[in-house]
Image (cartoon, coloured by chain):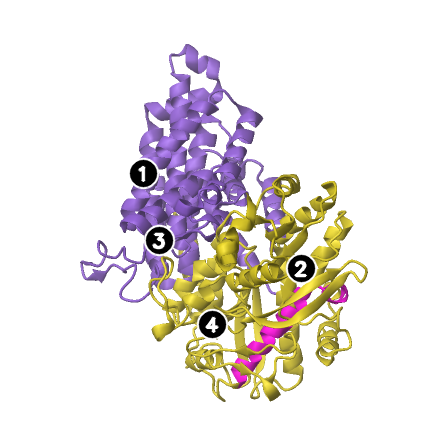
């Protein structure tokens, strides 16, 4: 119990910094930190799957695609408010994750990883196959008429409108606000899920399936549930990701590299640490943008990114979480 | 644990202070962003890495041209700085890159960015900010139909309002398809036509215009085969085989380079099949045809079209000698090699950059974003102000009702013995 007080203090401190951040840093950097928020949600989701139930996915970009397209299509065809669209993306991806999780029950380890990889590749083919409804390679543009539910003031603060009257776009502060608001809510939700019975069952399945089943844990139920939860998180992240792309959903945005980016984020984060997820999200969200800003690098910024990943894996093979644990051990010694 | 908390507090203070310093650093304000007394700063996004990176040479040629202009005194006493950012042809990377160019680099305009989807992902943003998004390297019809103002604007599902800050440069795909249809009807009136097209809006854009231009002769289409962008060459080859099986004696490829090479290489494998082959301009870069020949294709007699000069076909043309000097002045080995083997992307980049410099000259001694757009909407690169890199007899020209700067094409035929294109039949109008 004693340990949870400083933890609470640091969470509040980070939340405070995040609330103040858009008023301190430049508008462009606000956008980048907003993108970190998007990766935070997705990596958190992946961490629930990999860190808590030991199932490996290299295809969670597919759920981001489903979430992102859900948002764009609901907005395009039904002028749906973007926040509601994100909630529906969350729910839909929960269902999609449960369905895939059922199939995944028969697979484990490398076989599961390959199946999720196939999922990542095949989902982005759907818009090309059904291009009349899903926009093909030209993508789906969210409607610019979705302002009618958010054109109001709250305590004197004007909530930015999606569009009025010209072809306006989502502002950087709006992206930041939506991303980190969802991140905060989903973080609390994750904490509530993982702290109790469900979290214990998840960890039991991860550590030994046989022992878990022998103790009366419904192995299939919990493995599938973890898949559903992680997919739902990635779905919400995908919806906000599309908002950050000026409301434009397109297959190339959700390529295999995105799934690998999430995996790198989870690897840098390490397992089971909240701080790790924050560091992992910042790593994958900021590093590519910083490396493109290095002049005279031409098309080699992926090399910088790759080298950074290698260095991190050498220094902290079990991610930031593992690094923290090692430092704690050192201090005690 | 109290030490921990103190440390955390100190760390947070440092972070906040560092951020505050960083954010106030670059806060200089100007009347027109990116324009100073001695410099104009522009930017663009290109796939410098990844599968579409062969287009990176366009950016290289544009930077080479601006370097050459700078070495010769600049434009109205200003040098041009062109910041090129890599988006890997991924709209999710284009958005941060363009935001960085506009909000942090504070460029005057986004010039020459490559690709349809990257353009679509950023045109709402740029029009909202009133930042010129001009000379887009994409031939989709949007860059003409949506960007017109006044009565010339036609609302489409993807553009309910005009995008006055956006403009393309090259001829549009539907206009090009129309020219092929006319050619086939005139030269092979009883052709049995087979079409291979990419299964997306790009291929559909071509296919619809081609079918419409055939008019009552559209019944001569014996087969339409669609492939997906990510299909392997063997899948594309199977589709070409299907065209042969349907009895086509004329084939039209509305495809992208990799699939086009595979399609051309398949034809000789079908016994005693020698169809008249039409290849779209996107796939007709000389380097792709050379690659197809290496892969077993016999493209002698293939028909395509062009709108720029070729330094391998007319190396003694004064503009091509100039192009040689500009590219070689960069000292960039890759660009020099691409120039020597006739990569048409280089001449494309030079021609497009020439138009930007032309517009900048006409945007006044103190250019603003508005005056640049006005100059781009009243382009007239004729007589003494001729773009030297476009095909002889073609004019880069815009007006309030004509928003496509290029609306002319010339047909060309591949010579298997010269390993190069040979134009024929005079300049044709592609505009609708």
Q: CA distance from mark 2 to mark 3?
A: 40 Å
Residue A56: which numbered mark, if any?
none
> Label 4 marks which chain's residue?
B
Instruction: Name the colour assigned to chain A in the rendering.
Output: purple
Q: Position of residue B362 (x, y in %)?
A: 51, 86
Q: Which residue was labeled with disc 1?
A: A188
Which stretch appears magenta?
B335-361
Which numbered disc flags the more N-terminal residue, 4 or 2? 4
Q: Which chain is yellow?
A: B
Q: Nearer the viewer, mark 4 or mark 2?
A: 2
Are discs 1 and 3 both within one chain?
yes
Q: Position of residue A198 (x, y in %)?
A: 35, 24
> Which image quadrant for residue A172?
bottom left
Q: Nearer the viewer, mark 2 or mark 3?
A: 2
Residue sitting nearer the eye, A156 or B274: B274
Q: CA distance from mark 4 to mark 2?
A: 44 Å
Please say whether residue A155 is one of the residues in the magenta stretch.
no
Q: Is residue B121 left or right of residue B412?
A: left
Q: Is residue B137 visible?
A: yes
Please say whether residue B354 is one of the residues in the magenta stretch.
yes
Residue B106: which numbered mark, if any?
4
Q: Nearer the viewer, mark 2 or mark 1?
A: 2
Q: Is residue B60 left or right of residue A290?
A: right
Mark 1 is surrounded, within 10 Å at the Cα level, by few (under 14), some (14 to 19) or many (20 or more) other residues, namely few
Q: Which residue was labeled with disc 3?
A: A142
Q: Is residue B199 above or below residue A175?
A: above
> Label 3 marks which chain's residue?
A
Are discs 4 and 3 both within one chain?
no
């Amino acid at each position: 119990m004693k340990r949870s007080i400083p933890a609470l203090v640091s969470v509040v401190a980070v939340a405070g910094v995040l609330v103040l951040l858009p008023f301190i840093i430049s508008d462009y950097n606000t956008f980048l930190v907003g993108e970190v928020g998007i990766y935070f949600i997705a990596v958190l989701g992946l961490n629930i799957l990999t860190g808590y139930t030991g199932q490996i996915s290299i295809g969670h970009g597919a759920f981001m695609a489903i979430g992102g397209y859900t948002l764009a299509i609901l907005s395009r065809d039904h002028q749906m408010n973007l926040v509601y669209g994100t909630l529906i993306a969350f729910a839909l991806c929960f269902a999609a994750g449960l369905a895939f999780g059922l199939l995944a029950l028969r697979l484990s380890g490398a076989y599961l990883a390959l199946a999720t990889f196939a999922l990542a590749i095949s989902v982005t083919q759907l818009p090309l196959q059904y291009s009349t409804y899903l926009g093909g390679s030209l993508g789906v543009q969210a409607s610019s008429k979705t302002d009618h539910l958010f054109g109001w003031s709250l305590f004197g603060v004007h909530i930015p409108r999606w569009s009025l009257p010209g072809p306006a776009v989502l502002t950087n502060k709006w992206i930041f606000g939506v991303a980190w608001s969802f991140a905060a809510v989903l973080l609390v939700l994750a904490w509530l899920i993982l702290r109790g019975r469900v979290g214990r069952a998840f960890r039991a399945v991860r550590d030994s399936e046989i022992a878990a089943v022998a103790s009366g844990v419904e192995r299939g139920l919990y493995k599938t549930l973890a898949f559903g939860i992680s997919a739902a998180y990635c779905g919400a992240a995908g919806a906000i990701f599309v908002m950050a792309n000026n409301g434009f959903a397109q297959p190339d945005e959700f390529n295999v590299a995105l799934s690998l980016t999430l995996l790198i984020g989870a690897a840098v984060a390490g397992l089971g640490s909240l701080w790790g997820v924050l560091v992992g999200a910042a790593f994958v969200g900021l590093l590519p943008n910083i490396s493109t800003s290095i002049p005279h690098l031409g098309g080699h910024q992926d090399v910088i990114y790759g080298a950074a990943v290698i260095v991190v894996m050498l220094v902290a093979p079990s991610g930031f979480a593992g690094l923290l644990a090692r430092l704690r051990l050192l201090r005690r010694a | 644990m109290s030490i921990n908390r103190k440390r955390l507090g100190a760390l947070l203070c440092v972070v906040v202070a560092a951020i505050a310093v960083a954010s106030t650093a670059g806060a200089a304000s100007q009347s027109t962003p990116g324009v100073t007394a001695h410099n104009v700063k522009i930017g663009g996004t290109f796939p410098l890495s990844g599968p579409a990176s062969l287009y990176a040479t366009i950016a290289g040629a544009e930077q080479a041209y601006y370097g050459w202009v700078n070495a010769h005194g600049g434009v109205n006493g200003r040098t041009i700085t062109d910041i090129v950012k890599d988006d890997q042809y991924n709209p999710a990377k284009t958005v941060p890159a363009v935001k960085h160019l506009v909000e942090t680099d504070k460029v005057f305009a986004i010039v020459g960015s490559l690709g349809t989807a990257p353009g679509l992902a950023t045109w709402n943003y740029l029009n909202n900010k009133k930042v010129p998004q001009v000379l887009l390297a994409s031939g989709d019809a949007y860059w003409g139909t949506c960007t017109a103002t006044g009565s010339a604007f036609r609302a489409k599902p993807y553009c309910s309002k005009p995008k006055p800050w956006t403009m393309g440069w090259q001829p549009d795909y539907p206009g090009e398809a129309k020219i092929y249809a006319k050619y086939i009807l005139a030269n092979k009136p009883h052709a049995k036509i087979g079409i291979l097209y990419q299964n997306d809006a790009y291929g559909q854009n071509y296919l619809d215009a081609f079918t419409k231009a055939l008019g009552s002769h559209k019944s001569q289409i014996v087969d339409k085969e669609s492939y997906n962008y990510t299909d392997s060459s063997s899948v594309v080859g199977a589709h070409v085989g299907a065209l042969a099986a349907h009895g086509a004696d004329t084939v039209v490829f509305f495809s992208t380079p990799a699939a086009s090479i595979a399609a051309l290489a398949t034809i000789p494998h079908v016994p005693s099949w020698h169809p008249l082959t039409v290849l779209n301009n996107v796939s007709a870069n000389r380097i792709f045809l050379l690659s197809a020949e290496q892969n077993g294709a016999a493209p002698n007699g293939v028909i395509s079209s062009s709108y720029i000069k070729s330094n391998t076909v007319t190396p003694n043309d004064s503009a091509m000698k100039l192009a040689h000097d500009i590219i070689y002045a960069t000292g960039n080995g890759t660009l020099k090699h691409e120039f020597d083997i006739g990569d048409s992307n280089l001449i494309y980049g030079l021609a497009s950059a020439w138009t930007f410099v032309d517009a900048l000259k006409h945007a006044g001694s103190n250019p603003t974003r508005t005056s640049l757009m006005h100059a781009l909407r009243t382009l007239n690169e004729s007589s003494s102000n001729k773009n030297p890199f476009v095909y002889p007899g073609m004019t880069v020209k815009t007006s309030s009702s004509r928003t496509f700067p290029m609306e002319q094409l010339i047909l060309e035929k591949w010579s298997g013995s010269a390993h190069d294109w040979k134009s024929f039949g005079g300049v044709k109008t592609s505009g609708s």
